[in-house]
Amino acid sequence: MNKSKIIIVVLVLALSAIACIESTDLSSLQPTVDAIAQRVDQLDGGAPIDAPSEVMVGQADVEFTLKTGGDGHSLVFIGVGGDIDGVVNPTLVVEPGAVVQITLINGQATEHDLVIDEFEVATGSLTQIDQSSVVSFVAGEAGIYSYYCNIPGHRAAGMVGTLQVGEAALVNGGTSIVKNPTDLPGPLGDRAPELVQVELVGMEVEGQLSSDATYPYFTFNGTVPGPFLRAKVGDTVEITLRNEMTSAFTHSIDLHAVNGPGGGAVYTSVAPGETKVFTFKALNPGIYMYHCATPSVPHHIASGMYGLILIEPEGGLRPVDREFYVMQGEIYTQQDFGSGGAMTFSADRLADEAPEYFAFNGAAAALAGGGNMLTANVGETVRIYFGVGGPNYTSSFHVIGEIFDRVYPFGSITSENLTDVQTISVPPGGAAIVEFTLDVPGDYILVDHALSRLERGLVGILHVEGEPNPDVFREGGSE
Ligand code: CU
Ligand code: CU
């Protein structure tokens, strides 16, 4: 690529099986380095000029060593030495314009290489165990780039990591896909059945997964979960699904509130640019999940294509002061939890049901701050519509410091409620409603009580303001 402000010295060192990189005398190779070196003037719009190389092995601003393999079978890069020691597919962070040296060691007797397209970096292929190769290049513009193995199938299997050039790259690129938990329509009131028309759009967006990582989300209308749909038993619901022209995948919708094969998916399979409509009659009250049902369905759901539809019963639900909309899901990235940069989807981790991230409303810790917290006042009664998009993990939903006064288990509005419940079990493809009254001010933490998931991003906060209530809760002993 011409725009790269570069480059490059490439050395392929076919070292013997015994030689390790530290003991290699690189100085003997310097004439070769000089002979093939090129440099691009970084101050002149990137126009290439001929000049002696200033990029020499051993004179890099920053050096990384990566080893292929792992424990014999996994297709990954593993960091060797320094901050990245032992890290799988470590994020390599460098300054713009830095001279970067990467040493690749083959940890397996399998063919591997390492390339970075934007900087025209290529190690050449390594075929023997302990064979190694050194590449040097000038990191150009700030941004997020991928290094990966170019042997067919290896990138998809997990041999890919992030090269982050510059600080600015940290939060760039992703739009927020987080559904604000207060963004839902209010009660429909006492009315006769009517026609409810809903317009949904399949949108694929590079969204912010965490403060320093993005993920290629699939969404309904740009958020995770999609819009909260609200109708009344006896209503006729007309669903229009349009797939954006810019989409790469076909999408569809299956609403669990539907009586009919596929829940609408067959009538709504839309290729990019297409629009389709289907209609159903809301026969059963309840809180129901909807989701994309286009194969690979778990890929589409894990990437964010789910939401809730409430079919209100005759007479509606009992009044409360505040309603919230929260859904739990898993995200399967090739990169480890906490990696910076542009994450990619891992079909292998999805098949293994081994997500790197768990999220309320689409992103790591999305509801724990940043304008998306749940807020209420002492004395108010709140209702949370809680659904699990999954696609695979049952949630043990709990609010730390509160007791659910009333629960509609499995999303059933017509069954008798449960009362005084600490934790509810909500399966993937299911939902529930919880209600409770707030007695004491402070922060209440929303979790799945399978608490390992908290450390993978699954946390939200209900912030409650009001006067202290020492009769109910106080520090110290009784008087
Ligand atoms: Cu889809
Ligand atoms: Cu389903």
Image: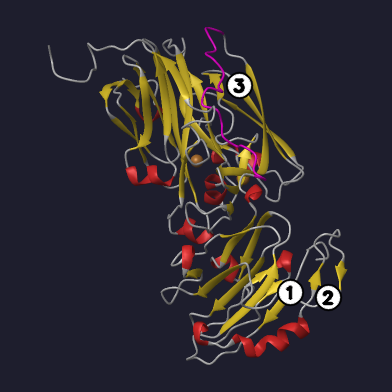
Q: Which residue is mark 2?
A: 51
Disc 1 + disc 2, Cβ < 8 Å:
yes
Q: Quadrant of the N terminus?
A: bottom right
Residue at (35% x, 17% y) in the render = 441
Residue lying furthest left: 479
Residue 361 in the figure: left or right of residue 10 = left
Q: Which residue is mark 1?
A: 54
Residue at (55% x, 22% y) in the render = 184
Relative to residue 394, is residue 126 depicted above or below? Answer: below
Q: Position of residue 393 (x, y in %)?
A: 40, 45
The span from disc 3 to disc 2 (Cα, nearest Å) is 73 Å
Query: Which is in the foreground here, disc 3 or disc 2?
Result: 2
Q: Amino acid at mark 2?
A: Ala
Residue at (56% x, 26% y) in the render = 228
Disc 3 + disc 1, Cβ < 8 Å:
no
Residue at (46% x, 48% y) in the render = 357
Q: Which mark is residue 236?
A: 3
Q: Position of residue 368 (x, y in %)?
A: 46, 32
Query: In the rendered structure, which segment of residues is drawn in magenta?
Result: 172-191
Residue 159 in the figure: left or right of residue 469 = right
